[in-house]
Image: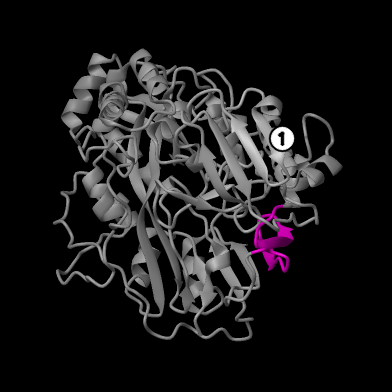
Amino acid sequence: MTDPRNRPTTPQFHLPRRSFLAGSCALAAMAAPGARAWAAGTAAPPGLGARDPDTLVVLVDATVENLDPATNIEWAYGLRPVYETLTVLDGTRTLQAVPALAASWEASEDASSWTFTLAEGAMFHDGTPCDAAAVKKAVTRLVLHPAGLSGTWQLEDPDSQIVVLDAQTIRFDLGEPRPFFDRQVSSQYGFWIASPAAAEAHSKGDDDMGSEYLQANPVGTGPYTLESLNPGQDATFAANAAYRGGWEHPHFTRVITKTIPVSATRRQLLETGEADMTLAMEPEDTVVLRDDPRFSLSDTPTFTVQYVAFATDGKLADPKARQALCHAFDHDTYIKEVALGTADKPTSVFPSLMQGMDGKDRLLPFDPDKARALLAEAGIAEGTELTMAYYSGFGDIEGQLLQAWLSEIGIDLKLQEMSFSAYLDVFFGEGTAEERPDLFYFSWWPNVDHPYSFAWGLFSGDAATFDGNTGRYANAEATALIDGLRNQVMDEEMAARFRRLADILTHEDPAWLPIQQERSQFVSRSDIAGLENNPIYVATLDMYNLSRTS
């Protein structure tokens, strides 16, 4: 993590992203910029005008319309104000969990059984108690929901494996050693505890289990309740007066998230005082605000990798063809001149921060001549057409850049822009190789800091498209390595297995072309305090611990 006070003094030159695309893709990489540094806001921010100072206004680029934790596979920022998990990661640490709904816990000697003691006074927003019986019902619903995230808990029979010992004590008999289960249940995907009473009261049957209701009417135990939801526009969260954490600290009593897809508009709303903070913006807007002392830029590394997934069941079945496409992308130029230094260069398909990584750069180097030769060896003729799908506002610039570079090696890349919902239908959907794109632009991060959490759904030959393996990638050695990592402590033997897996997936038999490793870049007014980013918790805010200092 870079100290924001260490400002670089070396002049830096940045070519605007779209101007870069208009130029030659053979542009030489510019001199490396100085150490990364971002402004820590010290000047008075723009005036609030008539806005309520106890209301936090957050700008986001995409709407979260599904607030049911059993079926939400989108963003978690709309879930975090309303729900809680049994544990939560400790500040910025990725390998340590601290209490949340659970006040304490202990594992059996072999870590196959975990007992949690729940916090006193936890109540769902509907007035029902969040006791051990309710937690069992909530988890059972998560595991059994046919359209949900059942695989996250790795429970075969929740009725027998979840044991209510008393009103405040619950035991999970996992059937196998799971030494970091306390961190697994801190995840933001599939582990939020929703009111089983609300789900049961509004269930439309076994295919619904209350999901349609909870998607727009979330009922959790968190510090805020949903006051209103206008899909595509905004959501308003109001303080839950009964929240056991209390409201003595100067918390915000209301939080409004506004959906503003255009980055420049989000920047303008910050500059005019109409908003308090925004999720990541386009690089050109980020660099405008980073040195403005009226704002603070929280810039920290994350576990999120943006990538292009290869469909391995079509034209790119030969690993040499996929190696060629990897050789055709100039990462150094992209990071400096397109991302403008607001992202990190990936080192493999895995996040470089993940435990067990060794810092080695496994990317295939930019080499157009090598790319052409590999295409010829793979039998890919010059002029071959490939298609790449992406959703509006995410991957368009990268697609145009890849399109230009691939044209130099004889590949005609056609770009397919889709709405977010339509894209998810394609990315996670079925269909023949002929019906689906050849390339998919997306991003991914793990539930916990462990390679199995990142790898299984994306790269295992046993995973389906709805698990995340949109490229239908299958490599026998890779699948065996992934299976061997399941629930294993990352000792030297497991780290060696992990690194071998990274070698296969990144350059021997590429599953992806990694594009960038994201950095968390919340931009906020200089009077907003309490922001802390954990690299596992992507694009979410601990709204309860934020406050206005003036």
Residue 60, compared with residue 185, is above or below; it is below
* Quarter the N terminus occupies: bottom left
Task: Please say whether residue 229 is one of the residues in the magenta stretch.
Answer: yes
Residue at the spot 83% in from the left edge and 38% down from the top edge: 203
**Would you say residue 232 sits in the magenta stretch?**
yes
Can you give x and y, in whole percent of width and height, for residue 223 in the image?
A: 65, 62
Q: Which residue is mark 1?
A: 141
On screen, 473 above or below 237?
above
- Of residues 174 and 371, the one nearer the viewer is 174
What residue do we see at 19% from left, 35% from top? 365
Residue plotted at (54% across, 28% down): 467
Residues packed near mark 1 inside 10 Å, few (<14), some (14 to 19) or many (20 plus): many
Q: What segment carries the magenta color?
A: 220-244
**Tally of numbered tags:** 1
Q: Front-most of 378 and 88?
A: 88
Residue 219 in percent (x, y) is at 74, 52
- Whether residue 149 is visible, yes or no, is no
Q: Toward the viewer: 183 or 324?
A: 183
Figure quadrant of residue 346:
top left
Task: Using residue 254 as the reference point, say whether residue 516 is left or right of it.
Answer: left
> Looking at the picture, which amino acid does disc 1 mark?
Arg
- Secondary structure under badge 1? helix
Q: Quadrant of residue 522?
A: bottom left
